[in-house]
Image: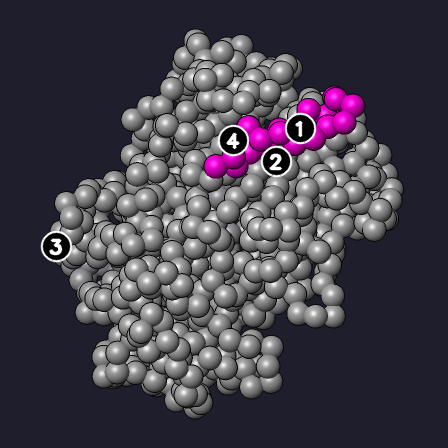
């Protein structure tokens, strides 16, 4: 591909003329404090008034972006970078191998099936044929024990709502079965059907996930959903989640119950022995303060990952009939490093640990003995190591900031890894380097971050720098490869990934250090990271941007209101911006476990103190801001972004633009590859213009990288 010439940017685009946004008179009282909410009407994202507002805002945004002369060339460059074949981690079962593959620019990856490692691969499910616009996704895919059918989930336009379909492996055609109203669910096969979780079908009255019950059902293949059997229902606690899994031998069904709407961050767990004449769920643990997950079973005992008495995680061996902790046996004790995941394959247990935010995998026998450390290809992120009890090999995927995801086959007998599939890139990722540094937060906590940039970078304070963070929900930001990110790095940019408290990088203590009334620690950590970058000569406030999505969008919003002087560009995506009302929309009540609730007087004070929407002040010069969201986001509803954009445009002092880009037919993130490329090109264009970067200046570097 010949790299197109990038025309120079003659000047910054003209300041936008924002659409007029009507301010209402809504005022709410919270524990004696009055809080104005002038844009309450924007919460109704299906009203004609809101739809007209969105159209007007998008028109302003695209008019501004259209003034950037090299925007289309940048999109072409990103398209070229991501255009390479990539394969997902294979799953081997009953002699069949399943994997997802994208040829390069397919909107959705295609599922393939083959017999054995060297059989011919055949298309099993191609999501690209399920909709004209390429926004229909296939999520979970689960094969029954007989190896005759797969059940899979389908979602449309980025929605979290799913339906389950069943496909016969011999004909590769769907049965008539369609299971609807599925959300927060697995597919757990047993006999001639599967357990799944759903909400009741909506009636003529308004449906609300805050009030309707999350139920467990059983579906038998070849029957109508109306014939499904209700397995578990709790009409006393409507905001609890209930999900079921079955062990590989289909002997036990495991019921997980969470009560996050009540601020609880753990799981209650019950077990059903499916081989009994009248199987019923019997509680194994009834409280909600700790994490539990059944990894496998050995006859009538369960291998369980747990944080009970072990905040960093351990592995227990628990009789399925156990009624007290006295019967639990620790087979993999807690370590100083957090246990991120546990899997089994071929009579072995694989424990995935985090050591300074990179993966270490330790291998054990089923009784926890014979510990060995798996030799990984490098320092980065490894995932996988799961398979059937009789397997002789395990697949895993390894990646880092400069190593694309590569699938390996791990021989259990020799403990050697061989490459199963490695992608071929159109550029050399070794021209970039990664190193980890630590900043010191306000309370003295050491906060890690990864820096990725071209080799030989000059630390003269003039490097365009993009800092990304999340800091919440026990989510760990691990080293991960992005071909599209190269479009920023090859311009001399510095990418920074901040590992803030609230995540899971150092275990449950790190998570709790950034949740509820301790949430300010997350923002203090990020501020410390940004100040470190400036102090150490990597960048300056005029060359610094901050980016985050969802809970990370909240992070960006809070940083904007607390330290608008510290960076030049803000890129909040699908952010949680109204911390006083987040729990009133769709699934938002589920976040009370991490954020707290404005219904509690003490938690209200903490939430109000950092809520981005409520901390925007008139007459303040905020960073140039591009807000992105999707019109079908039913997780973080777009009202968060709508209200924040309206208020920010109202108070902004100066010419730094405040734009909102609302993607249609997309949800909590882009619903197709083409939409994702288009959005990223606009985000990078906005970023470059406001940081004073003209891509043409590095065209020769880009030319060499693309050859």
CB contact under 8 Å: marks 3 and 1: no
- Residue 125 visible to the viewer: no
How many marks overall? Answer: 4
CB contact under 8 Å: marks 1 and 2: yes
| Mark 3 to mark 2 CA distance (whole Å) | 51 Å
Magenta region, residue range: 268-287
Quadrant in which residue 488 is drawn: bottom left
* Location of mark 2 (residue): 255
The residue drawn where x is 83% and y is 39% is 221
Q: Earlier in the sequence, mark 1 or mark 2?
A: 2
* Callout 1 crowding tier (Cα within 10 Å): few <14, some 14–19, many ≥20: many
Instruction: Say left or right for 57 vs 51.
Output: left
Q: Is residue 523 above or below residue 505?
A: below
Q: Nearer the viewer, mark 3 or mark 1?
A: 1
Q: Is residue 217 above or below residue 205?
A: above
* Location of mark 3 (residue): 535
- Residue 205 visible to the viewer: yes
The residue drawn where x is 84% and y is 46% is 227
* Location of mark 4 (residue): 285
Q: Earlier in the sequence, mark 4 or mark 2?
A: 2
Q: Is residue 285 above or below residue 100?
A: above
Q: Nearer the viewer, mark 4 or mark 2?
A: 4
Q: Earlier in the sequence, mark 3 or mark 1?
A: 1
Q: Is residue 201 magenta?
A: no
Instruction: Say left or right for 663 vs 608.
Output: right
Q: Is residue 277 magenta?
A: yes
* Location of mark 1 (residue): 272
Instruction: Say left or right for 514 vs 405.
Output: left
| Mark 4 to mark 3 CA distance (whole Å) | 50 Å
- Residue 499 location, x and y as percent? 30, 46
- Residue 695 location, x and y as percent? 35, 65
Residue furthest left as drawn = 535
């Amino acid at each position: 591909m010949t790299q197109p010439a990038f025309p120079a940017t003659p000047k910054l685009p003209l300041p936008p003329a924002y659409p007029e946004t009507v301010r209402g008179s809504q005022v709410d009282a919270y524990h004696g404090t009055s809080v104005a909410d002038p844009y309450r009407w924007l919460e109704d994202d299906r009203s004609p008034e809101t739809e007209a507002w969105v159209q007007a805002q998008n028109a302003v945004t695209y008019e501004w972006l259209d003034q950037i002369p090299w925007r289309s060339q940048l999109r072409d460059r990103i398209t070229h970078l991501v255009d390479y074949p990539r394969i997902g981690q294979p799953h081997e079962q009953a002699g069949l191998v399943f994997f997802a593959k994208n040829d390069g620019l397919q909107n959705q990856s295609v599922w393939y099936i083959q017999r054995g490692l060297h059989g011919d691969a055949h298309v099993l499910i191609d999501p690209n044929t399920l909709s004209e616009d390429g926004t229909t996704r296939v999520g979970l895919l689960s094969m029954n024990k007989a190896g005759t059918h797969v059940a899979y989930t389908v979602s449309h336009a980025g929605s979290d709502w799913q339906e389950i379909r069943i496909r016969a492996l011999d004909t590769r055609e769907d049965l008539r079965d369609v299971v609807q109203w599925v959300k927060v669910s697995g597919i757990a096969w047993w006999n001639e059907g599967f357990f799944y979780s759903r909400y009741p079908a909506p009636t003529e009255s308004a449906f609300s996930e805050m009030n309707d019950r999350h139920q467990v059902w059983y579906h038998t293949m070849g029957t109508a959903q109306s014939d499904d059997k209700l397995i578990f229902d709790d009409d006393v606690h409507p905001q609890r989640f209930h999900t079921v899994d079955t062990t590989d031998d289909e002997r036990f069904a495991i019921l997980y119950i969470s009560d996050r709407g009540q601020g609880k961050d753990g799981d209650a767990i019950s077990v059903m022995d499916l081989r009994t004449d009248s199987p019923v769920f019997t509680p194994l643990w009834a409280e909600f303060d700790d994490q539990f997950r059944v990894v496998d079973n050995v006859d009538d005992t369960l291998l369980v990952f747990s944080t009970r008495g072990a905040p960093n995680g351990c592995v227990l061996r628990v009789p399925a009939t156990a009624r007290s902790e006295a019967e639990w046996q620790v087979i993999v004790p807690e370590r100083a490093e957090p246990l991120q995941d546990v899997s089994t394959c071929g009579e072995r247990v694989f424990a995935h640990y985090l050591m300074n935010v990179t993966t270490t995998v330790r291998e054990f026998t089923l009784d926890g003995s014979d510990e060995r450390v798996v030799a990984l290809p490098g320092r980065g992120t490894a995932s996988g190591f799961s398979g059937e009890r009789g397997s002789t090999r395990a697949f895993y995927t390894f990646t880092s900031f400069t190593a694309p995801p590569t699938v390996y086959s791990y021989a259990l007998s020799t403990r050697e890894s061989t490459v199963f599939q490695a992608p071929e890139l159109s550029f050399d990722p070794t021209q970039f380097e990664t190193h980890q540094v630590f900043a010191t937060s306000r309370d003295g906590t050491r906060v890690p971050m990864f820096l990725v940039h071209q080799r030989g970078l000059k630390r003269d304070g003039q490097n365009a720098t993009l800092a990304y963070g999340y800091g919440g929900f026990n989510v760990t930001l691990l080293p991960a490869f992005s071909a599209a990110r190269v479009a920023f790095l090859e311009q001399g940019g510095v990418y920074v990934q901040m590992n803030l408290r609230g995540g899971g990088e150092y275990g449950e203590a790190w998570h709790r250090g950034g949740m509820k009334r301790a949430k300010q620690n997350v923002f203090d950590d990020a501020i410390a990271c940004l100040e470190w970058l400036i102090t150490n000569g990597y960048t300056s406030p005029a060359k610094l941007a901050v980016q985050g999505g969802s809970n990370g969008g909240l992070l960006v919003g809070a940083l904007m209101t607390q330290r608008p002087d510290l960076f030049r560009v803000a890129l909040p995506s699908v952010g949680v911006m109204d911390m006083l009302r987040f729990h009133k929309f769709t699934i938002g009540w589920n976040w009370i476990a991490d954020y707290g609730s404005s219904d509690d007087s003490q938690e209200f004070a903490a939430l109000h103190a950092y809520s981005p929407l409520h901390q925007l002040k008139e007459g303040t010069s905020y960073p140039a801001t591009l807000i992105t969201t999707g019109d079908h986001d039913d997780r973080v509803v777009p009202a968060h972004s709508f209200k924040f954009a309206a208020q920010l445009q109202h108070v902004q002092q100066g010419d730094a633009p405040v734009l909102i880009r609302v993607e249609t037919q997309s949800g909590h993130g882009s619903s197709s590859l083409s939409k994702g490329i288009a959005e990223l090109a606009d985000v990078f264009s906005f970023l470059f213009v406001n940081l004073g970067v003209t891509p043409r200046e590095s065209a020769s570097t880009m030319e060499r990288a693309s050859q």
